[in-house]
Image (cartoon, helix red, strand yellow):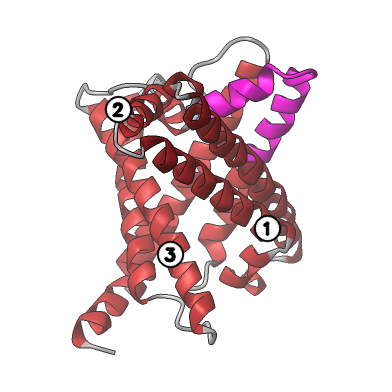
Amino acid sequence: MSRAEQEARRAETSRPMQVLGRLGMSGYGVVHLLIAWLAVQTAFGGGGEADQKGAVSTLAAQPFGAVLLWILAVALVGFGLWQLLAAAVGYRWMQDEKQRLRRRLGVAGRGVVVLAIAAYAIKLTVGGGGSSGNQSEQDATAKLLQLPAGQALVIAAGVAICVAAGVLGYRGVSRKFLEDLNVGLLPPGARKAVLVSGIVGYVTKGVAYMIIGVLTVVAAATADPHRTGGLDKALHTVAGQPFGPALLTAVAVGFAAFGVFCFGDARCRRM
């Protein structure tokens, strides 16, 4: 291990980074619980934008919202950096190098997503905000479609999202997420809760992001960027189906389950 890697490993396993990272993981759980609440409201014709931005905006609207947002933002920044450090030098307990590489790529992606949520929270605290998740997705898709081979690029992006969604679902069904946890640190009842919430949460997120991937491919095939969108668009698509409110309520339960799983993950994650 090079000196730089040693320093990164030391930073990743340091007490302050561990505390901040695990606190941030709990904050990530709060975001998913808020998404679940917004999804329930959407199922019955109300609510705001049912995605990460909507969750952060909901928190901002509460009493002492600015203080809560700063706490969430700091925690998420710590979690994001913790994930990026793990992507660089973590998971050395995994013997299979290919498996270790896959996990590092996965946590790198999560780190980027978490830092983006933190950045949005900070923008809200200083009076910013910006476009909705759906609008951002549609603007990005429109720009890609204008490029040479833009349609193929958007289709490739949609397929990549579908593949990532499949990986999420597989991690849930196969219980692969348990490889990252030291569940022996938890009492028996908590272990069962982590197992069940992890399975339900990962599978639900896989389904939701599979819908996003399909919407992206459809947008490319029809050259209509308005057909694409983020998580909010996917959940509204579910709501528009037969038995939509019941289906979306089930999805909300799944996102709530993932939020609960994040609290257990924060307690017993192996690094």
Label 1, label 3: how far apart the Cα atoms are: 16 Å
Residue 34 visible in the current orientation: no
The answer to which of marks 3 and 2 sits earlier in the sequence is 2
Residue situated furthest front in the rendering: 148
Badge 1 is on which residue? 170
Q: Is residue 203 above or below residue 117?
A: below
Is 52 or 216 nearer to us in this picture?
Answer: 216
Residue 66 marker: 2
The amino acid beneath tag 2 is Ala
Horizontal side of residue 67 vs 62, given as left or right: left
Q: Residue at x 55, y 15 (%)?
A: 47
Foreground label between 1 and 2: 1
Coordinates of residue 15 in the picture (x, y in percent): 34, 70
Q: Is residue 45 above or below residue 129?
A: above
Residue 141 visible in the current orientation: yes
Q: Is residue 90 above or below residue 240?
A: below
Foreground label between 3 and 2: 3
Residue 83 in which image quadrant: bottom left
Coordinates of residue 53 in the picture (x, y in percent): 41, 29
Badge 3 is on which residue? 105
Residue 190 in which image quadrant: bottom right
Horizontal side of residue 93 vs 14, given as left or right: right
Q: Secondary structure at mark 1?
A: helix
- Span shown in magenta: 229-256
Residue 197 marker: none
Does the magenta portion include 61?
Answer: no
